[in-house]
Image (cartoon, coloured by chain):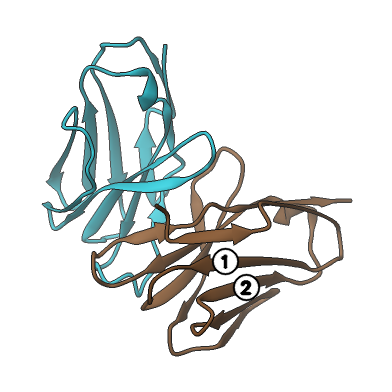
Amino acid sequence: SQQGEEDPQALSIQEGENATMNCSYKTSINNLQWYRQNSGRGLVHLILIRSNEREKHSGRLRVTLDTSKKSSSLLITASRAADTASYFCATDTGTASKLTFGTGTRLQVTL
Amino acid sequence: DTAVSQTPKYLVTQMGNDKSIKCEQNLGHDTMYWYKQDSKKFLKIMFSYNNKELIINETVPNRFSPKSPDKAHLNLHINSLELGDSAVYFCASSQGQGFRLPLHFGNGTRLTVT
């Protein structure tokens, strides 16, 4: 079964609004990454947060990590139509040398 | 100047056929992967190679055979294709296996088995 599960599965907002996506995982991690996938394309890395970090920023992106709750959130501020994509969290448990992806959140940003 | 390139982009074939997907990366990475994304967008790792050596084989049917002729290439050959093999297959690469650095993905190969 997958390690991460994103919530919500789908999110529709208007341009300029903020979008928040959550990821929950099951086992202890070394780090957690967020990826974006545009329709018909491969995944693109957005941000990586280590298990000893609680918050990280990159441009309009803000990621938080709560290891006690085994959860992470991705906040996209001032969303744009170009942010329309699926967003995945991925965890590295460090034991099996693999990156396990969640189920994804489909974000739709309308004008 | 594409970093991770896969060919073909689309592959339509009949059950029972054998097909190959090729992947090349020009990032100088030493680790390459094959992931399968199903119709619900669930992404699951299939194989991982580090310096041409198989590191992960994630209980994939032996009809799937990866081959890494060198660090920059990882091909996937599929024998006796089945309907359930229909999916999007992504190649990816990274430097090292520790996942402290991100994966770089190709744009995928959409395989349709009829």
Q: Is residue A78 above or below residue B106?
A: below
Q: For the residue labelled by badge 1, is the local secondary structure a helix, a strand or a loop?
A: strand
| Distance between mark 2 and mark 1 Cα atoms | 6 Å
On whether disc 2 and disc 1 are found on a single subunit, the reply is: yes
Is label 2 in contact with label 1 (beta carbons under 8 Å)? yes
Q: Left or right? Give the position of B113 relative to A16.
A: left
Judge the density around disc 2: few (<14), some (14-19), many (≥20) Cα neighbours within 10 Å.
many
Residue B69 spot, x, y in % from top left: 12, 43
Q: For the residue labelled by badge 2, is the local secondary structure a helix, a strand or a loop?
A: strand
Q: Colour of chain B?
A: cyan
Judge the density around disc 1: few (<14), some (14-19), many (≥20) Cα neighbours within 10 Å.
many
Give the labeled residue for mark 2: A73
Query: Which chain: brown?
Result: A
Residue B80 spot, x, y in % from top left: 22, 17
Considering only order in the chain, which callout, 1 or 2, is on the residue closer to the N terminus?
1
The residue at the point 38 percent across, 47 percent down is B44
Looking at this view, is B85 or B25 the one in front? B85
Give the labeled residue for mark 1: A23
Residue B54 spot, x, y in % from top left: 13, 51
Q: Quadrant of residue A57?
A: bottom right
User: Disc 2 residue type?
Assistant: Ser
